Amino acid sequence: MNTPISPSVSTEKTANERNDAKAGHDSPQNRQVTSLVFAIGKRIMNQRLNVAMVNQALKPIFKDKEGTMIRTIFEEKYDEGFAIGVAEGKAEGRADIVLMLFRKKFHTVSKRIENAVRSMTDPTALESLAAHLVDCQSPVEFEKALH
């Protein structure tokens, strides 16, 4: 009579587990990180990631580095936002100059031209447009340069 073979449950550690333990990968901190990674993965799969839970779980792991990490992230985002603001400011200033020159030359600016100029975000392109405006003989000629 054949009896079904059932897999035996071994309490002995595998070679990988023994190597991890020797290398220090079996620390409570690493188990906590691994547990957290699996929890985050599961939450992401369920699209219910709780930021507070992640922050709370990471706090003991990064307690010494938390202030530095937050400052670094803040500084990066601040610098990024500042650079974007400077670029937008340059574009807006140059658009204002193009429109002022257009009004000076042709006395009025249509909404279509104003919107087209204000929608431009490249300061260099706006500078070229201002230089082109000097040579334009009519608003129609300028408007062709916008397209």
Image (tube, grey):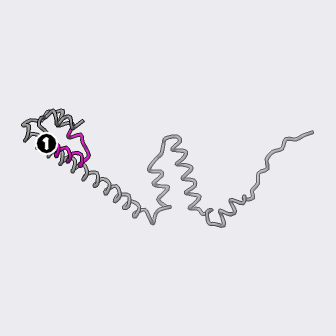
Report the predominant secondary structure element of the magenta stretch.
Answer: helix
Q: Which residues are magenta?
A: 116-135
Which quadrant is home to the C terminus? top left
User: Which residue is identified by label 1?
Assistant: 135
Q: Nearer the viewer, residue 118 or 31?
A: 118
Seen from this angle, which residue lies furthest right? 1
Residue sitting at x 51%, y 44%: 44
Residue 89 x/y as whole percent: 21, 50
**Is residue 121 left or right of 56 when viewed as pictured?**
left
Q: Is residue 66 above or below residue 107?
A: below
Residue that appears at 11% across and 43% down = 101
Provide residue 94's location: percent of width, then percent of height.
18, 47
For the N terminus, the quadrant is top right
Number of numbered discs overlaid on the protein picture: 1
Label 1 SS: helix
The residue shown at (47%, 59%) is 59
Is residue 86 positioned above or below 26 on the image? above
Q: Residues within 10 Å of mark 1 (few under 14, many from 20)?
A: few
Q: Is residue 32 left or right of residue 143?
A: right
Tell me where residue 47 appears, x and y as whole percent.
49, 41
Q: Does the segment drawn in magenta span residue 125?
A: yes
- In the displayed structure, does residue 98 sit left or right of residue 86? left
Q: In the image shown, does 81 or 86 lie closer to the viewer?
A: 86
Left or right of 68: which side holds 123? left
Q: Tell me residue 108's x, y (percent).
A: 9, 35
Residue depicted at x 65% and y 62%: 20
